[in-house]
Image: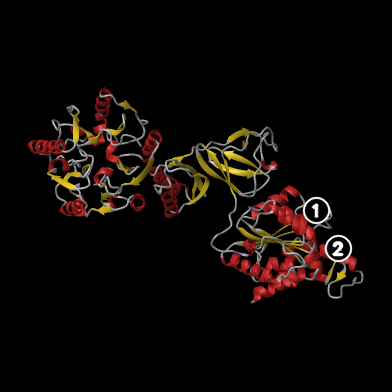
Amino acid sequence: MFSETIILRGHIIDSLILPKVLDQILTQGGEFKIGEIKIGQNRVDQSFARIEVSAPKHELLDDIVLRLRQHGAEVVEKKDVELEPAPADGVFPKDFYVTTNQQTFITLDGAEIEVHPALMDCAIVVDREARRATAKKFHEVRREMEIVVGHQGIRVVPVQRSTERTDVFEFMSTNISLEKPKSGIIREMATELQRARTEGGKILVVAGPAIVHSGAVPHLEKLIEWGFVGLLFAGNALALHDIENALFGTSVGIDLKSGSLAERGHENQMRALNVIREAGSISRAVETGALKSGIMAACVRHGVEFVLAGSVRDDGPLPEVITDTLKAQDAMREKISGVSTALMMGTMLHSMAVMNILPATVKTLCVDVNPAAVSRLTERGSFQSLGLVSDLEPFLRELTVALAR
Amino acid sequence: MRQLLLCPPDYYGIEYEINPWMSRARGAEVPVAQAQWKGLFEKLSSLDCKIELVPPQPKLPDMVFTANAGLTIGRRFIPSNFRHEERAGEAPHFARWMEEHGYEIVWLPKDLYFEGEGDALFGGDVLFCGYKFRSDINSHRAVADLLGCLVISVELVDPRFYHIDTCFCPLPDGGAFWFPKAFDEYGQRTIRDHLRDLIDVVEEEAVHFSCNAVVLGRDIVLPEGAPKLVETLTDRGYTCHPLPMSEFLKAGGACKCLTMFMPQRENV
């Protein structure tokens, strides 16, 4: 949304100029937010209103403002952002503006441009000629790039609660703890996922290996088969435990059916790794028939993209795992465009990393058996993030049942 | 006794076109115009008022419309800032004359168009101001700042009724007669909110500039061609004096446009 701030003064209440201006904004397809209003106390006192007018297109905004001027609206002149060159590669100037995950605009030469992507903890790099503003991480910045400093000329548009329809994210204001009934919320979640799929929004799943340990693999496979997963972010462990389970029926040596340690089960993980490494990649192992079932195989079969990011604890790792953290972040950022809903299950740190790169407009549901993990995750998000304390298997089981209806 | 400012029509004529009424192809008949103006002068003189005359100036044909000279409150005169260049030359002549006659001249900022009493009429203690075609709404605020009174700004939407005094005439008993369709919906609502006993003028009569009337107590001097309005006003106890105004209508003016109250109000 592009916006301008206008000021109305005078006997704008008695003359019905204020309601006229507000009506005109809406009639022309714009929106308004009253920033400040002072109403004269006595009959002869004049009133004052500061109104932010916004519209989806620049031309429409200009047109609206032009008409409002006729009714006495004065346009508040916008100040340009201040820019400074980056002192060195990978270093931002002092006082650089730190981005949030909200939609952000900067004013350059008197007009607003939107910063892309809406990514938190970045600096804004400005290309004057191309009139482009980009949120960039430290490692992406090069010496002499022009970077926004201070707070002047920056407008952040927080995600607003919708007045048209409410969804589970909006009517639930707290996390769902262990003690609360969950079926209703899970059904609402199912509706939300269906809506996202119908509207063409991409659903991102961030998953930890507990999915496998808790025996929830078949449920997640169903979600993938039904087209509810558009993108999967995980670590080496989820993929490896899933593949071990697919090949040997164990997860870290534990037989998932009996729950007891399988004979020489501790070898299975290494053997699973070797199968995939021998095939060259997970997708190749699926193609050759070496890997037939499980989450990863379902992803390959259904064309669901995945990014596996490595850590120091990894065994192997699997060939697709990106071991350079910065490259893994870049790969994740590259894939998230179009994501409208994120389902984060059983991994606090990985979910946190993903939260850091998601725009605030993305609805996030965090599910973990550990209440502390749920709190930490949802505290980082906007009001569009909801937490659910639950074991993963019963959660996913109920979710698939609700989706199957 | 009310004091009025008029300007003899020595140089009056249709020399340019700045409103839908004006057509250089359909010029004013000079002797008829002069006779009509004289008729107005004599009618007003016969009523309870004193008339001052400002000397007309060559090449300023519309100076005859003194309502647009400015707005006079007490001994203060706010000269007009004309929107059209064709009339801008009138302002210094009016200002000089007013100054010479002991009025304090208070100019509005030059970038705010304001066409005087033509767009600013008191109804009760409220100053009703028209905007869009001629005056800027922001000039109303400046006037409100100067005078410290409630100024109601109403948008004019019919270009034939380009000044508020062409479609709205307040009455001393608190009402007014008006042509509602000359205002946008908000303006109509505002006027209805602030004035009671409004008399709606039908379009056939409004186009004769029936609202462009000079009200002097119970006497109303208005252009002829509004029998229904005259009947209503007579029923309300007013004495109407219809006058022929055809030659001034050709320029988009009539009785009120040819007259400025000096002052419109003693104080606010």
The chain identifier of the residue carrying mark 1 reads A
Q: Mark 2 points at which residue?
A: A270
Q: Mark 2 lies on which chain?
A: A
Relative height, residue B155 to residue A262 (above, below): above
Q: Where is residue A95 in the image (x, y as percent from the top left)?
A: 67, 35
On screen, residue A133 versus residue A22, left or right, reads right
Q: What residue type is labelled 1?
A: Ser
Nearest to N terminus: mark 1 or mark 2: 2
Q: Mark 1 points at which residue?
A: A311
User: From the image, which quarter does the C terminus of chain B lie in?
Assistant: top left
- Vertically, is A400 above or below A138? below
Q: Is mark 2 on a helix, strand or loop?
A: helix
Foreground residue among B116 and A166: B116
Q: Position of residue B252 (x, y in %)?
A: 20, 42
For image coordinates 22% across by 55% down, the residue present is B202
Left or right: A100 in relation to B205: right
